[in-house]
Image: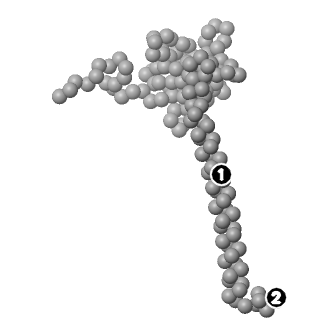
């Protein structure tokens, strides 16, 4: 047995075989992880509407088993610790922003002072006894380009 492993070609063969086995194990683990991610994405896709619309057909705000509430619309005013938004139906909502509230715009975290009138925002929080939403998370989208939006007439055709 000692003579077999003393030969250079045998050591190279055993090393190559071990490398192939390690490669196949790593490949198998990668396939398994990819399969599980695919199954998760498939289930998520099948339940997309239920995940986001909830049982009442409202965007995230009425999810079962939670107390998530919020508002979505265009920012119409900004103050030191609050701002107001107007939704597509013309309803206005006052939003209170605490020091721990996360405000995200694109990939950046911003402050309330960076919020501008005309920005589109989605707010997740809890209503207080006065009907004001105490924001926990705010997602801000850039304001629409000038000359676009639901209130603008379609562009004239040449």
Labelled pair 2, 1 in contact (Cβ < 8 Å): no
Q: Compared to 37, does 94 lie above or below?
A: above
At a point 17% along the width and 28% down the height, the residue shown is 158
On the rendered structure, is 49 left or right of 151?
A: right
Residue hosting label 2: 1
At label 1, counting other C-alpha atoms closer than 10 Å, the crowd grade (few under 14, some 14-19, many 20 or more) is few
Across and down, in percent, residue 117 comes to: 45, 21
Q: Is residue 100 above or below residue 129?
A: below
Identify the residue at the far top of this view.
130
Near-viewer residue (107 or 1): 1
Give the structural element (helix, strand or loop) at label 2: loop
Quadrant of the image occupied by residue 59: top right
Can residue 96 be seen in the rendering of this structure? no
State the image quarter where residue 19 is shown: bottom right
What residue sits 77% from the left and 89% below the top? Answer: 4
- Left or right of residue 94: residue 136: right
- Pick whichever, 88 or 4, lies toward us: 4
Q: Residues within 10 Å of mark 2 (few under 14, many from 20)?
A: few
Indicate whether 41 appears above or below 122: below
Query: In terms of depth relative to the viewer, which is nearer, 119 or 5?
Result: 5
Give the residue drawn at x 56%, y 35%.
45
81 to the left or right of 153: right
Q: Which numbered disc flags the more N-terminal residue, 2 or 1?
A: 2
Q: Which mark is residue 33?
A: 1
Query: In this orientation, does residue 51 appear?
Result: yes
User: Circle 1 sits in a helix, a strand or a loop, which is it?
Assistant: helix
Task: Locate residue 10, reporting x and y percent.
Answer: 71, 86
Rendered location of residue 52, percent (x, y): 58, 26
Q: Quadrant of the N terminus?
A: bottom right
Residue at x-position 29% and y-position 19%: 153
């Amino acid at each position: 047995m000692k003579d077999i492993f003393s030969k250079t070609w045998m050591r190279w063969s055993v090393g190559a075989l071990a490398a192939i086995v390690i490669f196949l194990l790593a490949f198998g683990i990668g396939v398994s992880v990819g399969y599980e991610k695919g199954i998760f994405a498939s289930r998520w896709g099948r339940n997309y509407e239920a995940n986001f619309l909830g049982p009442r057909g409202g965007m995230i705000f009425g999810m079962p088993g939670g107390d998530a509430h919020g508002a979505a619309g265009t920012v119409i005013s900004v103050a030191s610790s609050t701002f107001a938004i107007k939704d597509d139906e013309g309803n206005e909502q006052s939003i209170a922003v605490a020091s721990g509230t996360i405000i995200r715009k694109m990939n950046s975290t911003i402050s309330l002072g960076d919020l501008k009138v005309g920005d589109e925002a989605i707010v997740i929080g809890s209503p207080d006894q006065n009907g004001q939403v105490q924001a926990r998370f705010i997602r801000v989208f850039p304001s629409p380009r000038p000359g676009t939006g639901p209130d603008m007439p379609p562009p004239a055709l040449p």
